[in-house]
Image: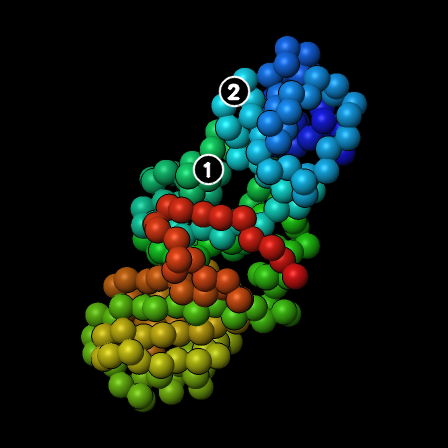
Amino acid sequence: MQLLKYLQAQGLGSRKQCQWLIDNDCVAVNGEIRNDGKSEIDSAEVRTLHIDGEAVQAVPQPYFYIVLNKPADYETSHKPRDYPSVFSLFPDHMRNIDMQAVGRLDADTTGVLLITNDGQFNHRMTSPKYKAAKLYRAGLKHPADETFCQSLKNGVLLHDDDETVQAAEAVLENPHTLLLTITEGKYHQVKRMVAAAGNRVETLHRLKFGEWSAEHLAPGEWQFITIK
């Protein structure tokens, strides 16, 4: 990829703006000033990127994958209504890049959230056809027992839906804490399943999405990940 196109793909400005940065010796890749917009850049070899002396987070190209530990009171939307967007947690230049969350988490739900610019990966992780497992820890209003878990595994009929939905797994950590694994992504699915089984979710945290966890990250922290 040419340097000029690389800078644009990093969200650092328009073609004209990026060319200005190059012409004015503002771009350093791996500590070396680069002033030829047509020179080739191997994104896999970029260890550091500085713009006018300021370190900038280099975004892998052409596709990138991010795991974020979503905090509470953030919306999974580019156009939030009541709370800040999860995308506001990223550096300014990255917010200029076309990236999408893989599914959604409610504002009050915390835990692992995947973000990417790879549409095929997004589809593969969210389509019911591929049955990507999502593990949640739900805090319950009322104490539950094994009968409650079994009903979730057998299948419950969601309100305003015409088919039952089954949990792939349902285990109690304690009477007020449920570990629930689902392979679909219906609207408010965990909360609706628990309600259909006769209880109520008071707190919700996603522990895993597929093979990925965010437990090693503090709330609001994120990192790039590699997809096999």
Q: Which quadrant of the view contains residue 205?
A: bottom left
Q: Is residue 165 visible?
A: yes
Q: How many marks?
A: 2
**Crowd tier of the residue under label 1, counting other residues whose Cα lies within 10 Å: few below 14, some 14–19, many 20 or above:** few
At 42% across and 36% down in the image, what residue appears?
A: 88
Residue 203 rendering spot, x and y as whole percentages: 28, 62
Residue 30 rendering spot, x and y as whole percentages: 62, 31
Question: Is residue 121 or residue 150 the one in the foreground?
Answer: 121
At 63% across and 58% down in the image, what residue appears?
A: 227
Marks 1/2: CA–CA distance: 20 Å
Q: Earlier in the sequence, mark 1 or mark 2?
A: 2
The type of colouring in the image is rainbow
Q: Which quadrant of the view contains residue 105?
A: bottom left
**Is residue 194 left or right of 165 when viewed as pictured?**
left
At 68% across and 21% down in the image, what residue appears?
A: 34
Where does label 2 land, which residue?
53
**Is residue 38 left or right of 102 when viewed as pictured?**
right
Q: Secondary structure at mark 1?
A: loop
* Residue type highlighted by circle 2: Gly
Q: Secondary structure at mark 2?
A: loop
The quadrant of the rendering that contains the N terminus is top right
Q: Is residue 198 visible?
A: no
Where does label 1 land, which residue?
90
* Residue type highlighted by circle 1: Phe
